[in-house]
Image: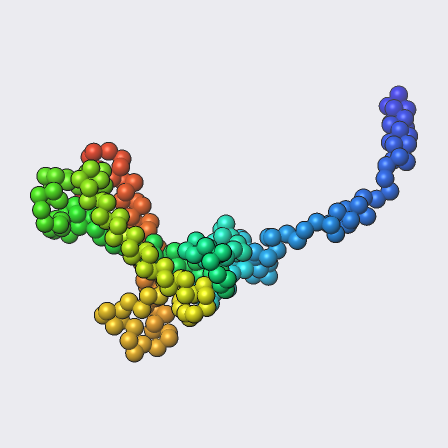
Amino acid sequence: MNAFATTVFAMMAGSAMAFAPASTSEASSALKAGAPDRMWDKMVDKTERSASLPWLPRPAALDGSMVGDVGFDPFYLSSIPKNWAGFIQPPQWEETEGIDTLYWMREAELKHGRVAMLAWFGWLATDGAFGITLRFPGDIYSVDAIPNAYNAHNILVEQGSMGFLLGVIGFIEFCSSAALVQVSKGELDREAGDFSLDPLQFLKGKSTEESDKMKLRELLNGRLAMLAFSAVCTQSALGESTQGFPYF
């Protein structure tokens, strides 16, 4: 009985195969020929692996030529083809060479890192972490009025001091964006984040190698500061007992 059932099943399978298409390779090739190019193929270098994430292909824009580049971009944001000049100047005003994604992101990374270094120091200094409590003069900025850095924002908004700070930051952003406008026009050959601000002359007379080491230190400290500032904000928000230094 089992042999008979097996024979019948084999015959039915053979009959079904007779009505199956001979090959799907031609249809598959036709579909591929009409499909647009994959963006992925332009965003990665399949011949190399990322230095920091060796299980992923290297982002095409991160070739190691930029200071601090270790190929860390798991979402391949640096490979997005986009002209970012429109964020600082409407494109209909005039035609420009534009600002590519990698330049824009390095500019943003340096700016956020520098702000985070100041912010982390300011947060801890406000809470007396370095032996003295640093505050602006005046009763409205005293420890009695503002007990700690965590509560400073809401209190200063109510006082009106944050409006002045917003105006100062807006003015600085407006002035610094002028350099990016010049870069987008091709009028200024400038490294991302370089405002020629070196009052202590750290880079004066330095070789390219020594200068790159200083730039790498700034970049690494900025990256660490962004993590550190996020951590101190989060730790302070856990409860009243963690709002003051040392935050635990």
Q: Which residue sits at x=28%, y=42%?
A: 233
Give the quarter of the figure containing the C terminus: top left
Asked if residue 62 lies left or right of residue 25, the reply is left
Q: Quadrant of residue 183?
A: bottom left
Q: Residue 139 in the image: x percent, y percent?
A: 8, 43
Please state which of residues 235 and 12 is positioned toward the viewer in this rendering. Answer: 235
Q: Which residue sits at x=19%, y=44%?
A: 161
Please state which of residues 146 and 11 is positioned toward the viewer in this rendering. Answer: 146
Q: Residue 95 in the image: x percent, y percent?
A: 50, 62
Q: Which residue sits at x=59%, y=52%?
A: 40
Q: Quadrant of residue 27?
A: top right
Q: Residue 77 in the image: x percent, y percent?
A: 49, 52
Can residue 133 be seen in the rendering of this structure? yes
Direction front: furthest residue: 93
Name the image colouring: rainbow
The correct choice, above or below, for 65 with respect to 177 in the image is: below
Can residue 248 be seen in the rendering of this structure? no
Asked if residue 42 lies left or right of residue 115, the reply is right
Q: Which residue sits at x=88%, y=21%?
A: 1
Asked if residue 175 lies left or right of residue 78, the reply is left
Direction top: furthest residue: 1
Q: Residue 227 in the image: x percent, y percent?
A: 33, 49
